[in-house]
Image: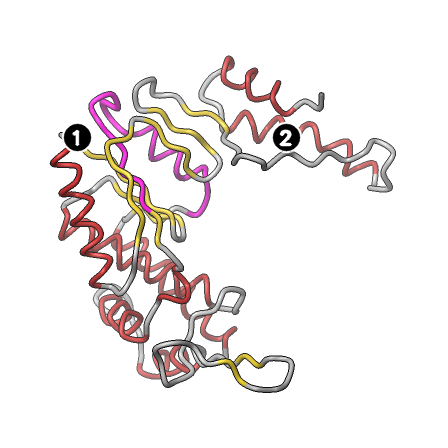
Amino acid sequence: MGKVSKHMMDRINEDLRQATKVNQWRNTTSVLKWFKDLPNKHELTFIVFDIIDFYPSISEILLYEALTWAKQFTKITEAMLEAIKHARKSLLYDNTGRPWLKKDTNNAFDVTMGSYDGAEICELIGLYILSTLQSKLHIENVGLYRDDGLAVLRSLSGRQADRVRKQLAEIFGNFGLRITVETNLKAVNYLDVNLNLITGKYKPYRKPNNEPTYINAQSNHPPSITKQIPTSISKRISSLSSDKDTFDQAAHSTEKP
């Protein structure tokens, strides 16, 4: 049933993306396109937010609200609703055969990471959230990649930024979700790229202690694979670098000492 639900959700989400035109990013490339198209970057500031425990925090009520909202833009039959709802039933047992019960619920409803349609359910909720942010907070330049959100506003005073932070928290709270928020930022690390509004540049970003893993030249990987690795790495760094100087700097940092 999860496979059936995934197929349905893929079609629903694609229809919603086409109809609403919100920024639900699927990869870093789409984030960079959004960033490069921002006008007058030096006049803007970033707001970055993260949804805490996104998957397990999605309630049955929130899913129902999102599907009801989605009906404005795409066809969702009662049979489809039943299939999606049925796929939410999740049972987990410990080593003794006793079932684990989710807190604060008396049914088997859950959105689990790794399930066939878990990512698609989260995408639907993300689309619903983005639409709500645009209408209630009047933030047009906002986007979401899974549980990581990013937006830009005209430069705000400290008091104005704090008001926006509280409004964001309130909106997500109404969904039964909690977030962390940072405001008034001129540069952010988002996914695997650093974005800078002052310079208008971007460069590769790697989380602390996330050191690259090197393949020994004498490994038993097929030669066709090992030969392509330097080229693939170079292309990746190039796609995340705004200019040659940025690329050279990033390329040097990936060289094995």
Q: CA distance from mark 1 to mark 2?
A: 36 Å
Mark 1 or mark 2, earlier in chain? 1
Count of marks, rendered view:
2
Q: Position of residue 184 (x, y in %)?
A: 24, 32
Q: Position of residue 176 (x, y in %)?
A: 26, 65
Confirm whether the magenta stretch covers residue 256: no
Q: Which residue is mark 1?
A: 154
Side (left or right) of 220 relative to 143: right
- Residue at image location 42% in from the left, 74% down from the top: 110
The one nearer the camera, 200 or 108, is 108
Q: Which corner quadrant of the image does residue 108 belong to?
A: bottom left
Side (left or right) of 66 relative to 80: left
The kind of secondary structure element at disc 2 is helix
**Which residues make up the magenta segment?**
26-49
Q: Which residue is mark 2?
A: 233
The kind of secondary structure element at disc 1 is strand
Amino acid under disc 1:
Arg
Image quadrant occupied by the C terminus: top right
Q: Which corner quadrant of the image does residue 209 belong to?
A: top right
- Residue at image location 37% in from the left, 32% down from the top: 188
> How is the protein colored in the picture?
secondary structure
Reply above or below: 60 against 139: below
Amino acid under disc 2:
Ile
- Residue at image location 35% in from the left, 67% down from the top: 58
For residue 41, which numbered disc appears in the image?
none
Q: Nearer the viewer, mark 1 or mark 2?
A: 1
